[in-house]
Amino acid sequence: MEPVRLLVNSSWHVAKAAPGIPALDVIRGELHLTATKEGCREGDCGACAVIVGEWTSGGIPRYRAVPSCLLATGDLEGKHLLTLEGLVEGARDGLTPVMRAFLDENASQCGFCTPGFIMALTSWLAEPQVADLAGALRAVDGNLCRCTGYAAIRRAARRLVQEFADLPLDPVERLKALVEAQVLPSSVLEYLARGPGHVPADFAAPATALMQPSERIGASAVVGGGTDYYVRNPDPDAGFAPLLIKRHPALAHIRYHADAQQQWLEVGAAVTVRDFFSSPLVRSEVPGIARYETAFASTLIRNLATVGGNIVNASPVADMTAMLMALGATLVTAPSDLASDSERLIPIEAFFLGYKKLDLAPSEVLKAIRLPAGRSANGSLQFSFEKISKRRNLDIAAVNTALVFTIEEGRCRGVRLSLGGVAPIPILSDAARDVLEGAMVPQDDPKALARLALATAQAAAASVSPIDDVRGSAEYRRRMVHQLILAHFVRLFESSGIAEELFP
Amino acid sequence: MHEAPMRNAPTFSVVAHPHKKVDGEGLMLGRPAYTDDLVPSNALHVKLVRSPHAFARIKSIDATEALKLPGVACVLTWKDCPRIPITRAGQGNPEPSPHDRFILDEYVRYVGDEAAVVAAEDEATAEKAASLLKIEYEVLEPILDFEHAKDNPIIIHPEEGIHEMFPIGFEPKRNIAAAYHMEVGDVEQELAASPVRVDTVVYTQAQNHVAMEPHAAFSYLDVQGRLTIVTSTQNPWHTRRLLGLALQMPLRSIRIVKPRVGGGFGAKQHIHVEPYVALVTLKTGRPARIALTRREVFESTFTRHQMRVNIRLGADPDGTLRAIDMQVLSNTGAYGEHALTTFMVAGSKTLPLYNKVKAVRFGGDVVYTNKVSAGAFRGYGAIQGLTGLESAIDELAHKLGVSPVELRRKNMIHEGETSEVFRIMGEGTEGVAMNIESCKLEECIRRGKELIGWNDERLVWEVAPGRVHALGMAIAMQGSGIPMIDMGSARIELQDGGFFKLHVGATDIGTGSDTILAQIAAEELGVDMEDIIIHSSDTDHTPFDVGAYASSTTYVSGSAVLKAAASMRRKLIDTVAMLWNVSPEDVIYEDKAFRTVDGSRHLTLHDFSYDTLYHNGVRMQTIEVTESFSGEKSPPPYLAGFVEIELDKETGKVDVVKYVGVADVGTPINPNLAKIQIEGGLLQGIGMALYEDVRYSDKGHLLSHNLMTYAIPSREDVGSIVVELVDSYEPSGPCGAKSAGEIGIDTPPAAIANAIRNATGVRLTHLPFTPDKVLAAIKAAEGAA
């Protein structure tokens, strides 16, 4: 086990802590950088947000905010960790423009959540996209504030949108412009100048590393983004050295594969949820999927969480799983040394054996997710996702569902309707499929379309037997299955007039 | 219509301006400021071992294995603690809360109650040691349903020695922590004679504060051997007094320091963590540190008191309200902190809104259950009582077929009026009679209607198939400190250079009170904000203050600052007059300088400050004043809340599209900070209305123990929040100010309930209004129709 080397603000550092220790403990404990706050240690509040600079597998530099309480220190190897303290280096009047906007708009009240908001908005500015208010507000959807009511934070965000409307869209040029504008510190230039080669050659690790190398392959645990792992295990033992999925470049790709029979899109298990939804390949295979990104947790979490982790966490109501299940994903597992000759292919619906029980041996990891390719070619692939939860974002759904089918010669084909939150595992609804598969889609007849929707919804709702829990009663969940399936039809056939038929 | 006399408010140069917070830049830069940022590196780490049972007796604690672990400094149990009954509630002396709690006890009364204390060199070792403690419990059957607590054969507090400090209706053998009853006129007779009556019930839930900074403290012995505790608290002096009692230490041996605090809302108006670090430091002589996890904050600090509010109203057909009967059952959980006072505020800060009734009655019990203890929380009973009262008023409007706005306007309180309730009901004691000198509710309502687009003919409309928008409203009042009980003080000292040290006991918990108190001082002293150096809340170094609660800081502490600044101004003039051998009337102080009326002498404040400290020989002196203030009254701020909701009839989901709060807080000392107080209060109230809910398993285990299972509003959860402050001036307040801290939270549950009623025809009675409840109510109504 090599010690973790990273650029912390403007100095390179060798972490004393083991790679499995959450970065928050290194930041506050080892580095004494106390601007980063611990508010919940579960990724829900955003007070511990930091910005991580890295080179993507495509050789592009990027800086993104993540919650440090769920970030494995080992995943910072060779990366640039920016904390609030690091942002102000070089700022002429002591405050960065993001801080200035917060101060001027009185957007900070008790101040405890403020560092997290500043990191999230700074990260938003660093993303190579046109800066608009909706984007700024989405960037802080994972930051909770209990004092202000968010109105002042909105005002601060609006100010930043006005101030930074014209940033370059080229990733490198943008970062340089932000350093020039003192939004980011000059240490970013140093990191950029080094290129993807990472750690400086003259930077030797201390002779006495404080860690014992771990001999375990497959380690004691496998950690993807950490967004579920560290919620369950907030205080790992001092020497914790899990297998960090993200450190395997082979698991970070999204690309096409084909064999003699078929073509598929392979998504590495370590691909972040953010990258999954942003991928042009994914977007072209599943038209419309981009709009569901914000249904998934928060920006901070999406920047950190992996697609594979969301599946392996085995929540009965995981949003990503519901989508992938409807899309007919196949999972690729491998031994923890990733040897390809021992790979297994498992349809995603067969992967879940019981509550939090998976068809995955202790010596195996989830390596990739395969999506059937080419279905969207003629524009007939229909995809819809719906969920209901108390809060709009950052909430675990009571019930979620995704629906996929293609329309061939006017009939539904390849129907897959997933349901989460109605059983100990995420399921496909056979009852819904039986109604829909092969059925005519009367796109011009809202009455008939409404009848089809109701028949599907009734069949699916009647076939489930959910339970009561903190997120909703059994009766409510059953009713929601019904309503969310109707919502699929309304969404997919928006212009048909079906809404007026269903909800007169 | 009663027309209020217009008062001309004076013009201000520092007050009523949106100055930036004095600590704003430092917090923006992330400077170490909060308790856990400042812990000495050699501090022991303290972990509390908590009960896994809702009710149990500890038979034995075996620490052998834990103590064998290298790095473990000590394990403390109830046998190591003085057997002194205390309360954890930071309140006046004597406390209106029963002394029914021990630092550690043989009994544990809810899941999460403290059973033992472990301290070790690092956090991981402390956690490990905590897990190695072998605690044998005799598990007892708990009471979880507060409607079955009174006179239940299970007695939650069977122990001897616990007591009330003065009569509060404390009957632990009946599971009653406190009880109260009052009546003006003959309510039954008035109700019987009223042609129109409504009878409603509302259940308000327990709510968590969720201050973003979890509770934290550290302690050490200073060079004189005195115990210093740095803590995230709202009330340093109450903390010192309660600790002195709990630890049997003279108060002179304890110092409490409050650094920056990351939010309070009432959560930190108690001693939750301080006794444990103090015990460890006293036992080991070492600095000791504790920081609760978020789960511990949920599981073992306080909640809002859950209440059942029964309201009966009687009225004439023309809408004249004749009688109000409010009967309340309150759940204080395992211990009686703030039991009586939150309960009384449910009446005392709501009933005066409708001050023209012929008869009014209020009463009920506060009972113990084996749940997380309830304590102070922004709104403090008023929000519970108001949710009941303002729901009932709307029901009356429906019954009468009149506008809910006009019904309120006809019956509500106005400037120049009073209410018997003020005299009768205080906080735990009798109240104080008070005339209302500032009340701009009429204007709040007028402006609020305008901002929401209120139209009595169109309170609900369809926006899409199955989805409607609806309007609702409610009005509210709060107080400004507790009259004749709350006291604050301020000390001002001139420094060489011509600036002033302002020392206050007032406790800035993130509200910005340091800033507004400095503004008041700067205003009165005719100097700039930069000329005031404020230091607050250190029991060794600042004068006394009861603390930041009961909406007291602006009014009570602010008045003390104003008095001190006025005193300083007089003292400066007197001193200069004496030096110049002229009469004080002949000295003018203006623009940071003194001059005689005839213009013959002139001296800057800067030069005077050097003269008095370095140059004036035997006449050298420190120019310093200390003043205190305790209110003879508690002028209420008012707010009219208007909401537009979207309700999805197919899913039952309710979203707030727009919330308008128009408030009368008197002069806003700092309009930006006052506004944000109200914006934040509104959102906290919206959270309570729509989804925040403390939930337990049937064994009493907390199900809502993190920010995922206990959802607070995120940035995405509310459309727009619009807050406006109307022109108002409170003659008794500092620079015309009243309070702004609590009033914002009070209206959302009632206004949203009223909007749902307008949307669906159904009155929801159990907060929060989650989609499943809303949908079930709609379906039940459809079934009945």
Image (spheres, rainbow, N blue to C red):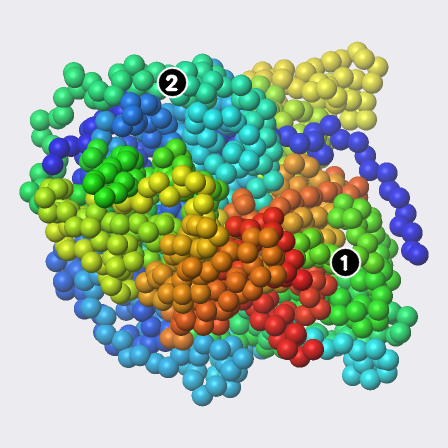
Q: Are marks 1 and 2 on the same chain?
A: no
Q: Chain of mark 2?
A: A
Q: Tell which of B604 and A222 is nearer to you.
A: A222
Please give left or right for residue B612 compared with residue B325 in the image.
Answer: left
Please give left or right for residue B9 compared with residue A75 in the image.
Answer: right
Q: Where is the N terminus of chain A found, in terms of image quarters?
A: top left
Q: Chain of mark 1?
A: B
Residue B648 in the image: state x and y as whole percent.
61, 59
In the rendered image of this protein, does residue A19 appear above or below residue B51?
above
- Residue at numbered disc 2: A172
In the rendered image of this protein, does residue A48 appear above or below residue A177?
below
Q: Which mark is residue A6?
A: none
Count of all numbered marks drawn on residues in the image? 2
Q: Where is the C terminus of chain A found, in terms of image quarters?
A: bottom right
User: Residue at 63% across / 65% down in the picture?
Assistant: B384
In the rendered image of this protein, does residue B409 appear above or below residue A409?
below
Q: Amino acid at mark 1?
A: Leu
Q: Tell which of B564 and B571 is nearer to you.
A: B564
Q: Amino acid at mark 2?
A: Val
User: Residue at 32% across / 17% down in the picture?
Assistant: A192
Residue B299 in the image: state x and y as whole percent.
40, 62
Q: Identify the element where label 1 is drawn.
A: loop
User: Residue at 28% across / 64% down in the picture?
Assistant: A355
Residue A442 can be seen, yes or no: yes
- Residue at numbered disc 1: B459
Q: Identify the element where label 2 is drawn.
A: helix
User: Residue at 41% across / 60% down in the picture?
Assistant: A437
Residue B653 position by quadrant: bottom right
Q: Tell which of B671 and B590 is nearer to you.
A: B671
